[in-house]
Amino acid sequence: MNNFAFTDYFSKFRLALILSLLTIIIFSYSYAGEEIRMSERKSAMVLMGGEAFDIPKTYLSPSDELPDRIDKENMIEISFFFPSFSGFGDRDNIATVGPYNPNQVTAFWTVVNGGGRLNANSSLKNALKYGLSKRDDKSDTDGLTAYKNANNSGVTYHAQNNHGDDVLIHCTEGPANSTCKLEYLDSKSNRGIFASFDKKYLPRWLEVNNKLLCLIKKWKV
């Protein structure tokens, strides 16, 4: 091979190598950009009362069309599902749409200093004072203190969470399903906490509560 041919061969080889490297670089940037865009679509920045929460959209709605920024005035509502406590899947619906899902937990937390109406201690005192509930020790279960509500409107259970906050869980029997609604004022954050779930999960109420608090802390920016 003469010098001219060798030089020409080397030039073509170098050109091919450069083109290959450029292709790899362009693909890498394109892939990284797509990853960033996908990441942006997977979560929404939810703003409420001067606070910000970076929440995966699957916990907010089964819809893929949520905006990347959401403004809330008084409360933020989410859903998660037993047994994994994950958000909405492909076949899941919001609680008021579609068939009832006994594994769904619908929950919300209020703006700081905005959850006074969920104060369990005050609610129980008023219920007893005005004859809306009365003690029913026969219905005590799983360490929960039971109170039978007036007009056959179910049973309210009293408990305390890991922080010593009074918690009320209102359970009702329906023709198609039985649900429980947990509510209280969180002393650490001074915000109202609420969760609704199927009654079969009543023994796991503290697990539901702790998961919700963990998610709130995890998502708070």
Image (cartoon, rainbow, N blue to C red):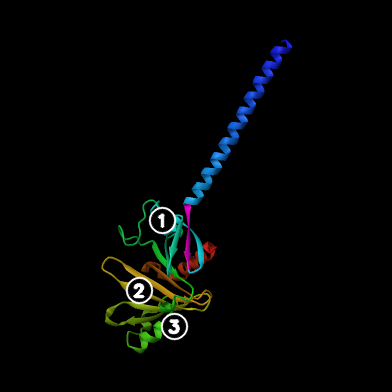
Report helix, strand or loop for mark 2.
strand
In the structure shown, which secondary structural element does the residue marked by tag 1 occupy?
Answer: loop
Amino acid found under the numbered disc labelled 1: Phe
Considering the image in quadrants, where does the C terminus appear? bottom right
Relative to the observer, which residue lies in front, 34 or 104? Answer: 34
Q: Is residue 162 above or below residue 11?
A: below
Tell me the kind of residue under disc 2.
Answer: Cys
Residue 178 in picture, x, y percent from top left: 32, 69
| Secondary element at image label 3 | helix
Q: How many other residues sit within 10 Å of disc 2, few (<14), some (14-19) or many (≥20)?
A: many
Which residue reaches farthest bottom? 129
Residue 23 falls in which quadrant of the image? top right
Q: Residue furthest top?
A: 2
| Quadrant holding the N terminus | top right
Q: Is 156 rendered above or below residue 46? A: below
Query: What's the CA distance linking mark 1 and mark 3?
Result: 33 Å
- Say whether disc 1 or disc 2 marks the residue closer to the N-terminus: 1
Q: Are marks 1 and 2 in contact (CB under 8 Å)?
A: no
Q: Residue at x 44, y 75 (%)?
A: 115
Q: Which mark is residue 171?
A: 2
Q: Which residue is mark 1?
A: 88
Q: Earlier in the sequence, mark 1 or mark 3?
A: 1
Which segment did they paint magenta? 42-48
- Residue 127, percent across and down? 36, 85
